[in-house]
Image (cartoon, rainbow, N blue to C red):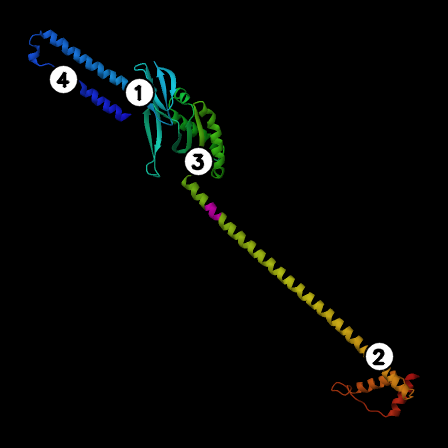
């Protein structure tokens, strides 16, 4: 559109010279006319050229093209008439004109980390989503700590008519409203709550500014706390607190590890003693069972021996009892163990031993 207007203005500027070159008569041609007739003819040519230039200028001013995602507020004789949507529109010269608004936006080139704020005066209102970074601002928390907060506000113009006629400067108004509301919210929170409750601050701030923004035809879609910067002494104290907390956790973890180590070692020793006791009990039970079985087998063997001895004595027609015979054999076997280093043997005559036995019986 701008190229078309520049070409049109160039043609209009060259038109008088072209017309004068074509229709300006030579002096010989006016030889039979009076001087006043020549002057009137020249004035008429100049007026015609001016009329053509003014007409072309009005035609250029009357034609307006609105791009996609943009609208234009049209006024007629200073009164709101319509909101021009994207497309081709006609404005009556002198009577109709677009409303001029002040606007600003962030200009970040090539995905740069730094962006500049551009302020413009335009008659086109962008209906896309906008972002405002109102920089660092000083806020005082509930525990009287002065911090700096950087926030971002995302908004979209939903009703351009309200955004133009209900507020004087829409971007600045949204920024100041967000700053004032953010100060009120942070003033009700402590420093620790400010760091740990960013989502809560974002949601509270969004709910607080949305009703006021809707009166201006603006829909606030998102508010984001970009950065929270405490003073240097507070930051040093926080870092010291974090280091102390980490050291405390390290000591606690080490103590818990030692406690668990002692508990596990005690449980291991207890399990070892239980297993040893269980093994000894099982061994004693097996040994007792073995001894009992051995005694039973020995008793069975002795009973078998007595039975065989009794049968042999009956066949030999001997009145000796089998038990007396076994006792005599056991007595003779025990005599083998009497001579030792720990025993003293006294030899006495047989008759003396009998008499001693008789005296004992009395």
Secondary structure beneath disc 1?
strand
Where in the figure is residue 280, as x and y percent of width and height?
Answer: 70, 68
Choose the circle earlier in sequence order: 3 or 2.
3
Dot 4 or dot 1, earlier in sequence? 4
Q: CA distance from mark 2 to mark 4?
A: 165 Å
Q: Residue at x 16, y 17 (%)?
A: 19
Q: Which residues are magenta?
A: 240-244
Residue 63 disc label = 1
Q: Earlier in the sequence, mark 2 or mark 1?
A: 1
Nearest to the eye among marks 2 and 4: give it: 4
Q: Marks 4/1: CA distance?
A: 31 Å
**Residue at x-position 49% and y-position 50%:** 247
Which residue is under mark 4?
22
First in sequence, mark 3 or 1: give its number: 1
Q: Are marks 3 and 4 in contact (CB under 8 Å)?
A: no
Badge 4 marks a residue whose secondary structure is helix
Mark 4 neighbour density, 10 Å: few (under 14) some (14–19) many (20 or more): few
Quadrant including the N terminus? top left
Q: Nearer the viewer, residue 216 or 316?
A: 316
Query: Is 97 drawn above or below residue 278 in the view shown?
Result: above
Residue under pointer 3: 225
Residue 270: horizontal and vertical position, in percent?
Answer: 65, 62
**Image location of residue 83, percent across then percent down:** 39, 20
Q: Are marks 2 and 1 in contact (CB under 8 Å)?
A: no
Q: Nearer the viewer, mark 2 or mark 1?
A: 1
Q: Pointer 2: what residue?
A: 303
Quadrant position of residue 179: top left
Q: Is residue 353 left or right of residue 83?
A: right
Q: CA distance from mark 3 to mark 2?
A: 104 Å
């Amino acid at each position: 559109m701008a190229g078309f207007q520049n070409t049109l203005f160039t043609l209009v500027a060259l038109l008088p010279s072209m017309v004068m070159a074509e229709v300006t008569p030579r002096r010989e041609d006016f030889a039979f006319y009076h001087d006043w007739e020549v002057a009137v003819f020249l004035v008429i040519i100049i007026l015609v050229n001016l009329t053509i230039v003014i007409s072309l200028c009005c035609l250029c001013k009357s034609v307006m093209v609105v791009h996609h995602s943009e609208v234009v507020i049209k006024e007629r004789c200073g009164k709101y008439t319509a909101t021009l949507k994207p497309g081709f529109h006609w404005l009556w010269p002198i009577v109709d004109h677009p409303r001029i608004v002040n606007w600003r936006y962030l200009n970040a080139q090539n995905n740069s980390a730094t962006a500049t704020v551009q302020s413009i005066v335009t008659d086109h209102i962008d209906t896309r989503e906008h972002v405002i970074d109102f920089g660092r601002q000083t806020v005082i928390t509930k525990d009287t700590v002065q911090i700096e907060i950087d926030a971002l506000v995302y908004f979209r113009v939903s009703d351009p008519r309200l955004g133009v006629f209900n507020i004087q400067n829409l971007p600045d108004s949204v920024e100041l409203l967000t700053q004032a509301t953010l100060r009120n919210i942070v003033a009700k929170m402590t420093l620790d709550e400010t760091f740990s409750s960013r989502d809560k601050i974002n949601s509270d701030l969004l709910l607080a500014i949305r009703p006021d923004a809707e009166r201006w035809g603006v829909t606030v879609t998102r508010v984001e706390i970009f950065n929270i910067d405490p003073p240097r002494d507070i930051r040093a104290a926080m870092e010291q607190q974090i280091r102390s907390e980490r050291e405390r956790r390290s000591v606690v973890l080490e103590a818990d590890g030692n406690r668990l180590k002692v508990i596990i070692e005690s449980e291991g020793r207890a399990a070892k003693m239980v297993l040893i006791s269980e093994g000894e009990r099982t061994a004693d039970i097996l040994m007792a069972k073995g001894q009992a079985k051995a005694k039973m087998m020995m008793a069975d063997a002795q009973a078998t021996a007595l039975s065989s001895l009794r049968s042999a004595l009956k066949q030999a027609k001997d009145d000796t009892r089998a038990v007396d015979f076994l006792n005599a054999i056991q007595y003779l076997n025990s005599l083998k163990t009497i001579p030792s280093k720990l025993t003293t043997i006294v030899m006495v005559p047989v008759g003396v031993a009998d008499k001693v036995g008789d005296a004992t019986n009395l």
